[in-house]
Amino acid sequence: MAGLRLLHTADVHLGAPFGFLGRRGREQRDQLKATFSRVVDLAMTSQVDALLIAGDLFDSAYPQPGLVGEVVYQLQRLDSEGIWTLIAPGTHDRLQPGGVYESGDLSSLAHVHIFRDVEMTPYSLGGLDLDVYGMAVNSEGKDVLKGFRAEDAARWRVGMLHASFMLPGKVERDEMLVSAESVAGSNLHYLALGHWHTRGDYSQGNTPAFYCGSPEPLDIGRGEEGSVLLVELEEGEPARVQAIPVGHRRMSRLELDASGIGSPAELYAHLRRMADRDLVLEVRLKGMWGDDWAASDWDRLEDELAPLFFHLRLSISPAGITAQDVEAYPEKTVIGSFIRIAREEMELREGEDLLVAEEAFRLGLAHLAGRS
């Protein structure tokens, strides 16, 4: 008996605003479309039987008509080859009156199925001897697979969900949840998960369960490439799941300690070596002390480096002020008094308030060092 080949994607978020990228947000929105086209190319060249989209294909339930037209065009390419596309509405593109999944543009394609029920419901692909189980996101906030078990009617049983995996003490609340116990008892040959933007293996018992991550990075993270999962099922064999990079850009957050860098000039050299026009880089610098750091023109440094990256942001956050730092400047001096006040303020704050206090401290030091 022939096996089954699937391509698993999720969290494409077509139309996402990317406000944190400023004027380059539009370019990244265009990149999402190009990357989705690349996913469709891969589905065709890999000769898969079906493309699984486990939620948040769109960033909104009401995307712009041109964006819907682009998706219809791409899925028509699969439809003409007899390749199925199965879509589970997610948290961003959830089922809404008059929304994208109610318009009929997508469901009019012969080889496209959209899951609309709020419980796991099978859709049978008789020619493949395959039952795909899926559901639309709802706000139940419970283990949506609890008590679920796929029937043995078809040779292949695959599930798709847009949900969070329950991790005791870490992830216990969300609109849609699945537990290790319910995944293990699902009787599925593969469970395609969406909602988490990072790839991960959450297989339980005999059930392979994976998050594919976003095909194109959406958030500042660890600089990982966007990817999709190619899933191959053969009777009597464990599932073969291969991550295939499809993303064009990377988004990375970097924390640096100024004491280990040495000087502003060495910081420039360090970042210069990382130059990549497809890298979104957010740098947070800590532990600055001394006149060289205080007098640095951070805006100018960022302006000089920014053209070498797709997007660059420098965030300057002085480390906590030690007793030795305070002792270095007598209390009756202006800078000594300022440091003591700043220390008291930062000790009382946390989260965003602490970041504001740290930024005020940096600006104050720069001013006192003679730079307005």
Image: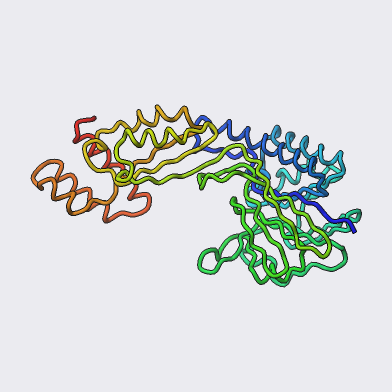
Q: In which quarter of the image is the N terminus?
A: bottom right
The structure residue drawn at horizontal position 38% and vertical position 40%, both measured from the top left corner, is: 315
Residue closest to the eye, 27 or 320: 320
Observer able to see residue 224: yes
Residue 201 placement: quadrant:
bottom right
Q: Quadrant of the C terminus?
A: top left
Residue closest to the eye, 215 or 223: 223
In the rendered view, does 219 fall on the left or right side of 191? Answer: left
Q: How many tags in the picture?
A: 0
Residue closest to the eye, 60 or 132: 132
The structure residue drawn at horizontal position 54% and vertical position 38%, both measured from the top left corner, is: 18
Residue 176 placement: quadrant:
bottom right
The structure residue drawn at horizontal position 29% and vertical position 45%, both measured from the top left corner, is: 259
**What colouring does the structure picture have?**
rainbow
Q: Give the image location of residue 364, x and y in percent.
A: 23, 39
In the rendered view, does 286 fall on the left or right side of 366? Answer: right
User: Relative to 242, does residue 32 appear above or below in the rendering?
Assistant: above
In the rendered view, does 350 fall on the left or right side of 365? Answer: right
The structure residue drawn at horizontal position 15% and vertical position 41%, both measured from the top left corner, is: 335
User: Relative to 190, does residue 283 appear above or below in the rendering?
Assistant: above
Q: Give the image location of residue 95, x and y in percent.
A: 70, 50
Residue closest to the far left = 332
Residue 306 placement: quadrant:
top left
Observer able to see residue 95: no
Q: Give the image location of residue 173, x and y in percent.
A: 56, 63
Q: Give the image location of residue 264, x and y in percent.
A: 31, 35
